[in-house]
Amino acid sequence: MQNNTIVQLDGVVKRFPVGRGQFTALKDINLKFKAGEFSGLVGPSGSGKTTLLNIIGSLDGPSEGHARVLDRAVENLSHREAAELRNYHIGFIFQTYNLLPVYTVFENVEFPLLLQKMEKSKREKAVMDALEWLGLTDKVNSRPAQLSGGECQRVAIARAMVKRPEILLADEPTANLDSANSHHILKAMVRLNRDLKTTFIFATHDAKVIKYLRRKIVLEDGSVTKDEKKEPRSKS
Amino acid sequence: MLALKLAYRNLAGAGLRTWLNVIVLSFSFVFIIWFKGFLEGWNREARRDMIQWEIGGGQFWHEAYDPYDPFTLQDAHGMIPPVFQNEIDQGRLTPMLLAQGTFYPQGRMHSVMLRGIDPDQSILDIPSRLFHEAGESIPVIIGTRMASNHSLDRGDNVTVRWRDVKGAFDAAEAVIVDIFKSNVPGVDAGQMWIPLNRLQTMTGMEGEATLLVIRQNTKIESSHPEWMLKDHRFLLAEIDQIIKTKSMGSSIFYIMLLSLALLAIFDTQVLSIFRRQREIGTDMALGMTRGQVVRLFTVEGTMHAFLAAGLAALYGIPFLYFQAKRGFPMPEGVDDYGLAIAEKIYPVYSAGLVAGTTILVLVAATVVSYLPATKIARMKPTESIKGKIQ
Ligand SMILES: Nc1ncnc2c1ncn2[C@@H]1O[C@H](COP(=O)(O)OP(=O)(O)OP(=O)(O)O)[C@@H](O)[C@H]1O
Ligand SMILES: [Mg+2]
């Protein structure tokens, strides 16, 4: 991979077995993402956004083609290597937050660092930093059930960024949020992207999110139909 | 260890369900230990009582003696061999003569075993020193069961009938000179104790005996070909068998209890693995390997057993200690088991019992936790994250 390409997809095809036949969810996807991009996969429901994000996140492999993520061929990774890649280099943010309900905010954010076996003092500092970043320092000991949707998603962002991953994948992060909260978390992500140079790849059909993107990749029916650089919404 | 830490967090977070499982499992823990300890205590007490009251340190039986065949009793007697005389004189052996008889309390006929015992013996706990002359009547000592079965009291007179050595019937008045209390039914129910020389005279079997009881912890060097040595293994075989049967019968009970507790864990595990699919998918998205997730869920299940062991220790140790000290009162009317039953049984817990039970519960809990967890290994994280039941 040359210069600062962080994700490269070459002829990626994804098929799912459906009944007796197969359903092709992704058809010949060719894309490159550079480090520090703030980009999004945009398209109607069922167009393959989540499927593509899962492949980039090494949760799933392509049926055909090559997906290189941080110089690793996703299709060749063992379970263990894929887990390791996600553990150290990729953060996920989900539409449904997916916080661990029995953990406190602190424990939720601490979780990825526990997996990395980071030592306690470093871990605590990193968690507190992340929580501070997202304005959650007063919720450290709350549990997800006690938080609003916006707060939950901020915890999820803190959990995704606490390990300082190169890539942050966000699947419909605002779908369950009202517009004020959506803008709030989007600004937090813009800030992350700017300060930490984290590469963001969204999957969304939310106009609010699209406004923030600097690159919009339109997926339709499993194919890329448009890939445009755009001026992000003016600084606010 | 990471899995331990996370498992503990998950369990603590799950709250009530965890504690319900832990409480149920801790009950079976304590119950199994208590019950086994109870049987062991019973066993020991029963053996000790049998030794003290009935069988001593072993016995020599006349070759014709067969306690299971009362018809042979007529012939099961013989002259006490001179080789044993020295041991008898030194109180290391005591002869006993058995004869079948009948007696007539309130005019009804009952068969009875007449047992002649040396009034000066100190090998068995039978209070033979309480024999005293009662004029013409035969002095008799009986146990409390015998007394209450036939409404007999100290000082009562009963007619006793027996056959002498030639088979001729004879009868005489007997007087109850004392009543003793023993846990051993074999020396009590249907038994009448008579001074040995009196029974020998009554039956015309002077100098004869049916069996010789050895003092506890005493080795008798002498032997005689017509007198068979019966050791503890032989004499206690029956009670060992009864205890074994009881403990097998009761193990069904606690296997059920344990299964119930394990089923609760199993159920919790299966349920968690379905309900917590999204969590499992998220764990994997955050970088856990499948192996780590399987381990986490297994440890979570197994941890129930550890917590249960801790909880069981918390209330179980005082409870078990109290039981061992104060004893467990046995209900009345359980006398008919054919082995000694004390009014109170003092449970005895061995280190092996506690360790064995702990290992059993831990291993069983691990198995029922691991089996459902293996299902996780077959889940696709992309599907689990959606939280759909597969
Ligand atoms: N495991 C699967 N088995 C079969 N078909 C699947 C599977 N996963 C996805 N698909 C199909 O692939 C297509 C793309 O799915 P995907 O989830 O990527 O869509 P999406 O663009 O994320 O849609 P949405 O905006 O609704 O989230 C859909 O038609 C879906 O039904
Ligand atoms: Mg989707």
Image: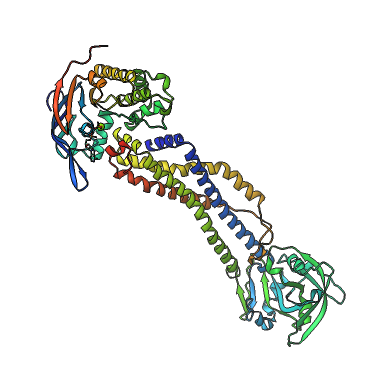
Q: Quadrant of the C terminus of chain A?
A: top left
Query: B367 left or right of A185?
Result: right
Point out residue A25 in the picture as x, y percentages from the top left corner.
18, 37
Which quadrant of the view contains residue B297?
top left
Point out residue B81 in the picture as x, y percentages from the top left corner.
68, 80
Who is closer to the viewer here, A43 or B211?
A43
Who is closer to the viewer here, B306 or A96?
A96
Which quadrant of the view contains residue B3?
top left
The quadrant of the rendered image in which ligand 1 is seen is top left
The residue at the point 29 percent across, 42 percent down is B379
Q: How many marks can you see?
A: 0
- Would you say residue A57 is visible in this rendering? no
Q: Is residue B315 above or below residue A124?
A: below
Who is closer to the viewer here, A138 or A14?
A14
Point out residue B146 in the picture as x, y percentages from the top left corner.
74, 68
Point out residue B95 in the picture as x, y percentages from the top left corner.
71, 74
Who is closer to the viewer here, B152 or B85?
B152
